[in-house]
């Protein structure tokens, strides 16, 4: 290498160095913050270079410090010397914020200083004036402290998030919420501190805030406190700071401990669920009602109870559904609650079902008031007690019926006794009148008088027969009867003085029937009286009869055969379908007055005659009763002709009766017929007389025994004793109790004939004809 080439290369390297230095100075001066370079000389750090920002920052004074040692320049600031030494030894970067006071002016500034090691022996120092930022932060810190004091009473805390380094700061109150003491290392709000079920939602909401999709962040989530328990917080945040490009760099927010609220909400939810479950229990109806009487909330049980849907009920008031007769007491109690006199009440009341039925309910009402004392709403429990009420009513009705039956039994006993005694009296009148008629010329005026007496006695006899039927019922004592005649007489008698009139459709060819005239008379009378009451303003009662034959497929529960059909029809108010099945039950009545025995008696009489009765009715159109009675093959005229034939004969007849006038009357009749008579006043005497005569030439050919002898032996015991003496004894039973079972079934008790009191000579003659013709 020659000398020229060496020179050229050196010159080139110098030029390159100069160019490189120029580039360095250009870049160094372009740094926007004050920057210095210190060089280690083995003993101390020497300031060797500064940039233009440093010159401006120090008002040019920095130029006087080039070449000055650090120990001289910062002899009053040991921290700077320590930072330089540490940076050089560790060959690392050190950052620090510090306060600096200018000696010349006394002013203070806050600086952010960054020390960077540059190989092999340089340290570059960047200095930034952060005085204004520090003032802002101090102001914010002061504000946050004051806010922290305010929030501490509300279990609220402050937090901030540095988006550049994800550093989270929390205040003392936030620490308390998490159960940390002031001396404890504050927890990091990392994923582990958040409930796993909440983390994704938190991140999504924060991301939306950072990306400016929302103006603020709000979330309720769970955090793990120091004791390891999950607490609930509500967290709020907003973007607090942006960088030069407008990108968010810091969030600040607050949290509030809402654990108790969440517990309350949970308890409330559980309570509401419990209330809903309780409210919807199908045991009773439940409702919440308003002070204006409207339904606010109702359960399914109440809807079913009243027949309305939930929506229908809530569009109505309970006033609309309350039975009119129960509304006043309910309103009275309701108003007392409104006025503050009582807090609740309980009553039994009736609601009206949607279908019109009456629902008996037990109602309990309690009010809930507002702070001012006014009623907020009512809670009502409604229990359906219809079955209980109906049972109570039925029980009450049964008790009434029992009392009524006991009264009726007493009245019946009295009526039976009166009828018995009255029949005995009528027996004397009727018997003597018939006896006298046989001894008076038919053209004599006295004959007509006696006929009137006999007819009146007959009407009286019908009356006593009805009394006896009323008192005890009993089996009918039948005879072949002209039904048309009996119906007409009874109907005309029952409509005397009424606004109604009878229209008869009675064919002449109607079959006869064997009936108890008194009982059938009572049947027709009851039906006609009912028809009268069904037409209070008057009208026509149509009564018709017809012959009919019942066949096997007729649908009528009767034996196949011939029957007489009796129809009683009115155009009255009618009977509802609800009541129709019960009208024949004893004591059942829909009338305010009445015993409820009329139709029951009718039904009983028809059944005892082997017949049947049906009813058809329509409201406001009328009612039709159809009666079926077995027809008789006997002719009424034949029966009456036999009755008109006066019996004559010979023999000895014993008459036992406790009434002397009857003994005389019967004796007179029998004597006229040709018989010899003997009298006994009770059964014991009759037995002795019969026994004494039995084994003599004067034995009795026939005995007439009174069934009832007060204080003595009656006819039944007497016939038993006579049969012991003479198994072939011929005896007839006689009684004023014409409905006694012995009278209807006399043959079952050893008698061969029956003579109901009162009776005429013709009726007695008919019995004797029958007995002696059968026995010879």
Image (cartoon, rainbow, N blue to C red):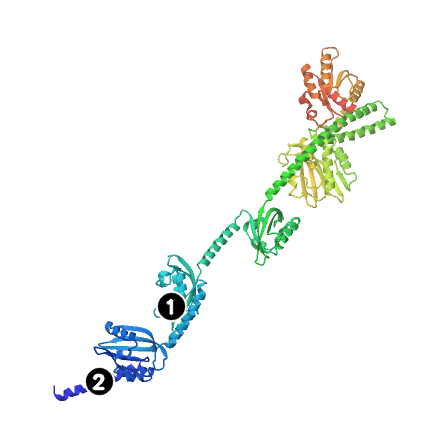
Q: Is residue 306 left or right of residue 211?
A: right
Asked if 206 appears above or below 421 in the picture, the reply is below
Q: Is residue 82 left or right of residue 307?
A: left
Measured Cα–Cα span from mark 1 to mark 2:
49 Å
Instruction: Quickly name the residue at label 2.
Output: 16
Of the numbered discs 1 and 2, the one sitting upstream in the chain is 2
Asked if 324 appears above or below 258 in the picture, the reply is above
Local SS, label 1: strand
Marks 2 and 1: in contact by CB < 8 Å?
Answer: no
Q: Quadrant of the N terminus?
A: bottom left
- Say few, some or many: other residues with alpha carbon within 10 Å of mark 1 (under 14 / 14 to 19 / 20 or more): many
Q: Is residue 517 visible?
A: no
Q: Closer to the camera: disc 1 or disc 2?
A: 1
Q: Nearer the viewer, residue 557 or 125?
A: 125
> Which of the 4 image quadrants contains residue 716?
top right
Q: Is residue 565 visible?
A: yes
- Farthest residue to the bottom: give it: 4
Image coordinates for residue 662, horizontal then vertical, percent: 78, 22
Instruction: Quickly name the residue at label 1.
Output: 161
């Amino acid at each position: 290498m020659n000398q020229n080439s060496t020179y050229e290369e050196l010159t080139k390297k110098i030029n390159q160095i100069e160019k490189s230095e120029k580039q360095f100075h250009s870049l160094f001066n372009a740094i926007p913050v004050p920057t210095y370079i210190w060089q280690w000389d083995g003993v101390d750090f020497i300031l060797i270079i500064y940039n233009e920002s440093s010159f401006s920052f120090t008002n040019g004074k920095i130029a006087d410090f080039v070449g000055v040692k650090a120990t001289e320049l910062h002899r009053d600031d040991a921290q700077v010397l320590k930072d330089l030494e540490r940076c050089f030894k560790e060959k690392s970067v050190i950052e620090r914020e510090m306060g600096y006071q200018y000696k010349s002016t006394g002013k203070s500034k806050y600086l952010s200083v960054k020390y960077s090691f540059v190989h092999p022996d340089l340290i570059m120092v960047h200095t930034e004036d952060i005085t204004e930022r520090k003032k802002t932060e101090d102001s914010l810190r002061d504000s946050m402290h004051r806010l922290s004091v305010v929030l501490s009473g509300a279990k609220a805390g402050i937090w901030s998030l540095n988006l550049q380094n994800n550093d989270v700061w929390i205040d003392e109150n936030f620490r308390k919420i998490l159960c940390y003491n002031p001396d404890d290392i504050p927890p990091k709000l990392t994923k582990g501190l958040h409930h796993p079920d909440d983390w994704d939602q938190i991140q999504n909401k924060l991301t939306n805030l950072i990306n400016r999709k929302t103006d603020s962040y709000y979330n309720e989530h769970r955090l793990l406190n120091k004791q390891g328990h999950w607490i609930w917080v509500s967290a709020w945040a907003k973007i607090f700071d942006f960088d030069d490009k407008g990108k968010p760099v810091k969030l600040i927010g607050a949290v509030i401990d809402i654990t108790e609220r969440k517990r309350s909400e949970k308890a409330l939810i559980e309570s509401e669920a419990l209330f809903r479950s309780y409210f919807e229990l199908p045991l009773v109806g439940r409702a919440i009602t308003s002070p204006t009487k409207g339904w606010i909330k109702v359960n399914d049980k109440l809807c079913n109870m009243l027949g309305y849907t939930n929506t229908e009920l809530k569009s109505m008031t309970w006033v609309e559904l309350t039975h009119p007769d129960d509304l006043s007491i309910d309103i009275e109690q309701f108003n007392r609650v409104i006025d503050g006199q009582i807090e609740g009440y309980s009553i039994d009341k009736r609601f009206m079902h949607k279908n019109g039925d009456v629902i008996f309910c037990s109602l309990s009402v309690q009010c809930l008031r507002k702070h001012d004392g006014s009623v907020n709403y009512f809670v009502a429990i409604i229990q359906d007690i219809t079955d209980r009420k109906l049972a109570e009513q039925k029980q009450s009705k049964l008790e009434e019926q029992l009392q009524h039956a006991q009264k009726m039994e007493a009245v019946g006993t009295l009526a039976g006794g009166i009828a018995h005694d009255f029949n005995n009296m009528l027996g004397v009148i009727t018997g003597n009148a018939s006896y006298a008629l046989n001894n008076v010329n038919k053209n004599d005026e006295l004959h007509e008088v006696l006929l009137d007496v006999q007819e009146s006695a007959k009407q009286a006899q019908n009356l006593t027969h009805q009394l006896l039927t009323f008192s005890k019922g009993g089996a009918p004592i039948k005879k072949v009867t002209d039904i048309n005649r009996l119906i007409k007489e009874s109907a005309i008698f029952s409509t005397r003085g009424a606004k109604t009139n009878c229209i008869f459709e009675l064919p002449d060819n109607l079959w006869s029937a064997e009936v108890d005239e008194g009982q059938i008379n009572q049947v027709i009378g009851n039906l006609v009286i009912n028809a009268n009451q069904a037409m209070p303003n008057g009208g026509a009662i149509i009564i018709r009869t017809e012959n009919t034959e019942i066949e096997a497929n007729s649908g009528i529960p009767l034996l196949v055969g011939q029957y007489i059909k009796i129809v009683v029809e009115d155009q009255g108010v009618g009977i509802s379908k609800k009541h129709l099945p019960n009208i024949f039950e004893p004591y059942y009545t829909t009338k305010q007055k009445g015993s409820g025995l009329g139709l029951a008696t009718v039904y009983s009489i028809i059944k005892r005659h082997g017949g049947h009765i049906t009813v058809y009715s329509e409201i406001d159109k009328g009612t039709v009763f159809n009666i079926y009675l077995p027809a008789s093959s006997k002719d009424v005229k034949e029966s009456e002709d036999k009755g008109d034939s006066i019996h004559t004969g010979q023999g000895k007849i014993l008459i036992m009766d406790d009434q002397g006038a009857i003994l005389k009357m019967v004796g007179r009749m029998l004597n006229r017929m040709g018989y010899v008579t003997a009298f006994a006043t009770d059964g014991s005497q009759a037995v002795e007389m019969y026994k004494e005569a039995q084994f003599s030439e004067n034995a009795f050919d026939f005995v007439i025994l009174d069934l009832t002898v007060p204080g003595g032996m009656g006819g039944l015991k007497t016939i038993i004793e006579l049969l012991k003496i003479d198994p072939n004894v011929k005896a007839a039973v006689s009684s004023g109790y014409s409905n006694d079972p012995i009278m209807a079934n006399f043959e079952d008790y050893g008698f061969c004939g029956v003579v109901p009191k009162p009776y005429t000579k013709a009726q007695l003659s008919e019995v004797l004809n029958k007995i002696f013709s059968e026995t010879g």
